[in-house]
Image (cartoon, rainbow, N blue to C red):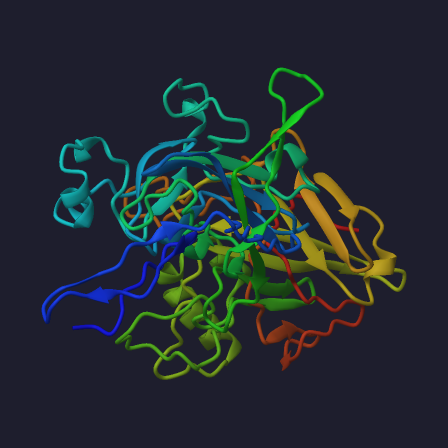
Amino acid sequence: MPKDIKLVNDGFKCPKATRKGKTYMQVCCKKDPKYKVKVKKTKFFTRRYGDLSFTYDVLQAYGNNYLAQVTIDNTNKLGRLDHWNLTWEWMNGEFIYSMRGAYTRSRNYANCLYGPAGKYYADLDFSEVMSCDKKPVISDLPKERANDSKVGKLPYCCRNGSLLPAYMDESRARSIFQMQVYKLPPNMNRTALEPPQHWKIEGVVNPHYKCGAPIRVDPTEFPDSSGLQSYSTAIASWQVVCNIARPKAQQTRCCVSFSAYYNESVIPCNTCACGCEDNTRCSEKANSMLLPAEALLVPFENRTAKALAWAHMKKFKVPNPRPCPDNCPVSINWHINADYKSGWTARITLFNWDSTPFEDWFAAIQMGKAFPGYENVYSFNGSKIDNKTIFFQGLPGLNFLVAEVNGTRKGDPRVPGKQQSKVFFNGEECALPTRIPIKGGAHKLGFKFSTIIFSAILAFLLVKDHLH
């Protein structure tokens, strides 16, 4: 037998238990009239600033489920996302019953049906559930669903995963979606609310974001939808802050090639600039082979003959084994077009080697010594945003970059998407060559031109004319 029995519920007083024989004991607990409920104060953290932030607001709460709204805000001048995919991890067996403004990539409900959710919600039709994954992958809805009465009709939703910097378009720097979340025991109290953990977001060719853990913040305020001068607050709010992390070597998704009017050879993108495949027969460490200018217009697999012929003509040494490709979906060519005592001009061209077209492009070039001498840009808008960065965006009709297409005739090399139609840029930091063209036909290491230091935050850049 135990020594004593007590009731641990708050507000009760229990005397010492009495024994009746060797196999029985009892105690009578009564409510304490003097007991005062201890109000637990929720600690709110100050809202933080980062390159990208999520706000997880609980708008409605019930015993076994709640309605949550997720707001994504892009606050970096050069950051952006295209076709974003968001993922997190549920920690207490939650599942997404329905969504508005977004959808999950997988709708496999077997995890619910054969798991704890299936046992607790025995009468629930799980075929209607949006996602039972512990780590769901969430995507934005396409523009065509914006006015859909079932899944659309939310402000800042349904933009096909496009999130622009506020400097470019403030109205498109935010995305919102809502979801009905079901819970499992023991978290069945309507105030038992916990956000998902381990947030991660990615785009097609975009910056790499590193996100922190959710922090509890003061409830978000929402203006009255009818126009009255009043506001409502969320039941509970959490914030997740993400910052752009510089990509590691061979993990970027775009690269830069260098060329100049005074040198016939083009320095292509670095070998394995965007990574290399396993078990390759090529060299991952050899410098990329110098090319004639026209070789930049064809995919890497079609450059071999041109590269070998150019090396033979110019008496360049051919590495054995030959260098691997750059494997980048987007490449940019920076070409010094003219160089005078009073200044220089450059032409920049972007090539899309991927099957995905891009729209609403922008670009940013970060320059050191040359920045004060920036004069003008042609073919699109250019503006200064700090003491060393120039921001570009397309003129109307020049904001779409087509995907790679087949050649004119069967068997011709595939043709990259480029300036001929329209263009798109992202904030991905691109890999730069370790060499630059120099006068006299030779090449040297480093990035310094006589008039410019080019340390690119350069996203994607496409110019038809010249940069003065």
Q: Which residue: 13% across, 64% down?
A: 24
Please give left or right for residue 123 compared with residue 206 in the image: left
Residue at image position (42%, 47%) is 193
Q: Is residue 276 above or below residue 30?
A: below
Residue 230 picture location, percent across and down: 68, 23
Task: Answer yes or no: is residue 466 visible.
Answer: no
- Residue 208 x %, y %: 51, 60
**How many dots with numbers?**
0
Q: Position of residue 383 (x, y in %)?
A: 78, 45
**Image position of 55 (left or right of 286):** right
In terms of depth relative to the viewer, which is nearer, 219 or 97? 219
Work out whether residue 257 can be spotted. Answer: yes
Give the quarter of the figure containing the N terminus: bottom left
Please state which of residues 376 and 301 is positioned toward the viewer in this rendering.
376
Work out whether 465 lies above or below 323: above
Is residue 383 rendered to the left or right of residue 33? right
The quadrant in which residue 117 appears is top left
Q: Residue furthest right?
A: 342
> Which of these two is toward me, 313 or 243?
243
User: Could you tell me which residue is drawn at 63 percent across and 45 percent down?
Assistant: 362
Tell me where residue 52 appears, x and y as whole percent. Answer: 58, 51
